[in-house]
Structures are given as C-alpha cells and as structure tokens.
Amino acid sequence: MYFCNIGVINMTSDGGAKIRKAIDTVQDSFYVAFSIEKLIVSSSASGPFLQRIATLTEQISYMAYKDPVFQRHLTRLYVENCLLDRIPPTLSNMIELEELFIIQCALTALRLEVLVNNPKLTTIDLTRNRIRQLFPITTPPKTKLSVTSLSLVANQLEHLDMSMFAFMPKLELFDVRGNRIVRLEATAPVTYSLIQILLSSNNITQFDTRNLTLPVLRSLYIDDNALTELPTHWGKLPNLVYLGFDRNYLKRIDISFFGKFPTLNAIFICENNVETIRTSTPITMPELDIMLFESNQIVSVNFTGCNFPKMNIISLMNNRLTTIPPLFQRFSESRLTMEGNPIKCCNMTVFKSKITDFQLRVTTGTTQSDCPTTSSIVLDQGRLACCDA
C-alpha cells in the first residue's frame, strides 16, 4: 500500500482542490491511502464533507472523531476502542448501512430491536466488548433482517438462546467464541441458513438444540468447552459432515451416538479424558472416513457392530492402550495410528507386516535409545518399532 500524507486540509477554502491534486499526482499507483493530519470543516465532518469526497474515495477512517452524529448515507461504520456502552438508537437513521463494527468498546448488552430499521445491514461485528445480555426483538419487524454474519467474539455471555435470532433467517455465520457460555439451547423452533456456527472457548456444559434446524450446516466444533458427556438433545442437521469435541472433559464414548448423523465424514474427540470406546447398538455410517481420538486416556476400544464402508483413518495416538485393537478385520483397508501407546511387544509382532506396509503407524526409531518404551522389535531397513516387554 502506498501512503500519502497531505497535511492540513481546510474544506472552507482550497481543501477540495488540494485533495484532488494529490489524487491526480498518484493516480497510477496500485493502491493509495491518504493521511490528513488535520481536517477543518465548516459544519459536520460526517455531512457535507463526506458527500463532496464520496466520488474520490472508497473508504474513510477517522482516528479522532468528534462529530456527535453519523449521517444516514454511510454504508460501513467501524468504531474501535471507544466508550460506547450501548448501540445508539440513532443507528436506525442510517438506512444505507451494510456493515457495522463496534470493536473493543464498552457495550454491556445487545438489544436486537435497534437493528430492525437497517434493511441493508448484512454484517454485525461486536468483538471484544462486555456484552452479558442479549435482548430479543419484541415487536416483529415488517420484513426479516438481512443479516448474514453476526460476531460476538470475546464478550461475557453466559446463556445463549438460539431462538432469539429468529428474525435473521439469512444468518450464515454466527461466532460466539471466547465467551462464558454455560448453556446453549433453542427455546422455540427456529431454522437458520447457518454455514458456520463457532462455539469454541466457552464453558458449555448444557447443550440442547432439539428446536434448532440447520439444513446447510456442514461442520460443528464444540471445542474447548466443559462437556462431560456427549449431548443427547439435537435438532435437525441433515448435512453435517464434520463434528468435533476436542478439549472437553468426556470420559466415555459410545459410537452408536453418532448414528443420528448419517452424513458424517469425520469425528474429532482429542485431548479429553476418554478411557473407553464402545458400541452399544449396531451402527452403519456410509460416509464416515476419519475418526481421531488422540491424546486421551483410552485403555479399551471395541468397534463391534460398526459398519463403516469408507473408513480410512483411525487415530488412537497418545493413549494408554497396551494392545493393538482388532480393527483390521472390520476395516481392512483403513489406516490405524497407534504412536505414543505402551503396546506390548508380543502383540505388536503379530502386526509387523501392517507396520512395514505403513497401514499401522507406531512409534519407531533406529536404536533402542530412540524409544520411550522398554523394548522394541526389528522392522525392515534398520528400523525398530518401540514396545513394552
């Protein structure tokens, strides 16, 4: 980016001509940003001045803004590091507004009612405020809101009711990472066009979305939360492909649970406290391709009753398994990762061909000193497979 400093601009005299001359001087540059040290205007810096300069620029930023109002013709409003403790009701005057950013300010609540008169508003970003409460729209607007992206990242929310955004049916991205959410639910039936819902880094222990329909959602990651069990109350997710629960407090996994998501391609449950994996009832998942259960405390695995015709990768890396689970009889073409487990040498020897064919990955080295275990078995090409005697 090419920066051009044009000093003091006095719009009551030759300021307009000075700006035009500066633009003409650098018009061949690929991308130009002008810096005005001091702007002198006759009345409002957001009024006549913006109208005069609108044909010459695509974006204007005020580092120190002292005008008490914003004009209705703005399409993008970005405010950062301010003392605003609420969204001003005069926002409704900005009928052309498409994007609203209030970043790292003092907002403590969001009243959705203040947004109903901004028909073109599609993007709302309220990252790093102090929002603890959301107040729903009480009077149904004449038309549904056009909002497609809503970010409440790094606020102080503790309870999230997804039905509160029922007047935003076009919502595609909803981001509430880094709050204090304990309970997530939908207290009334609601459908959204969400492509992404980002929930990581909260304190979620209660998850009930039985009233929630997300027909196009493909991925859902409830990472870095406080779940001790897999949630049992789910809404409709007919196209869910990726589901993750990394870094929670899960202890037991029943694979049969995932039968309610027949379109799943991948399951991620890493860095929990999982000790056992089992299947309580037979299950068929025609698209399941990847399962990662890395860095848990797993001592027992039983996939009896599982029919996963496309299973490709199963990772049990960094657990406490002393034997290699008999998975190849059930998933003959799959690849199994067992690195970082204290496998007994007598058990590992049986799978030596799988290791040399790279269908089974275990901890290896060139000498015994490379191994974190007490013993090893010899593979081809001078490699050793680390194991416990």
Image (cartoon, rainbow, N blue to C red):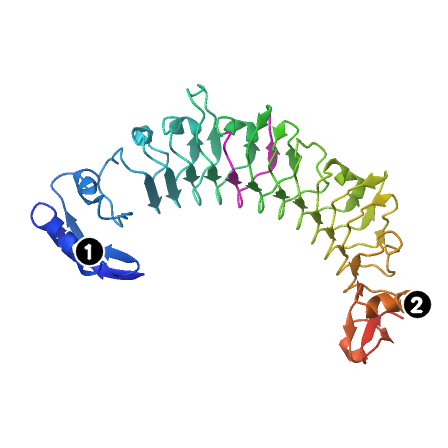
Q: Which residue is mark 1?
A: 23
Q: Locate residue 281, reporting x and y percent.
A: 86, 38
Q: Which residues are magenta?
A: 169-187
Q: Locate residue 125, reporting x and y percent.
A: 43, 41
Q: Which mark is residue 341?
A: none
Please give the name of the residue rendered at 54% of the width and 45% of the height, measured from the top-left corner.
177
Q: Locate residue 159, reporting x and y percent.
A: 56, 34
Between the residue at mark 2 and the residue at mark 1, the CA separation in whole angstroms equals: 78 Å
Q: Amino acid at mark 1?
A: Ile
Locate the C terminus by quadrant: bottom right
Tell me the chief SS of the magenta region: loop
Please give the name of the residue rendered at 74% of the width and 50% of the height, measured from the top-left corner.
289
Q: Locate residue 239, reporting x and y percent.
A: 65, 38
Q: Amino acid at mark 2?
A: Cys
Horizontal side of 289 relative to 378 (left or right) equals left
Q: Decide whether residue 73 is among the magenta residues.
A: no
Q: What residue occupies the far left of the structure in this picture?
A: 13
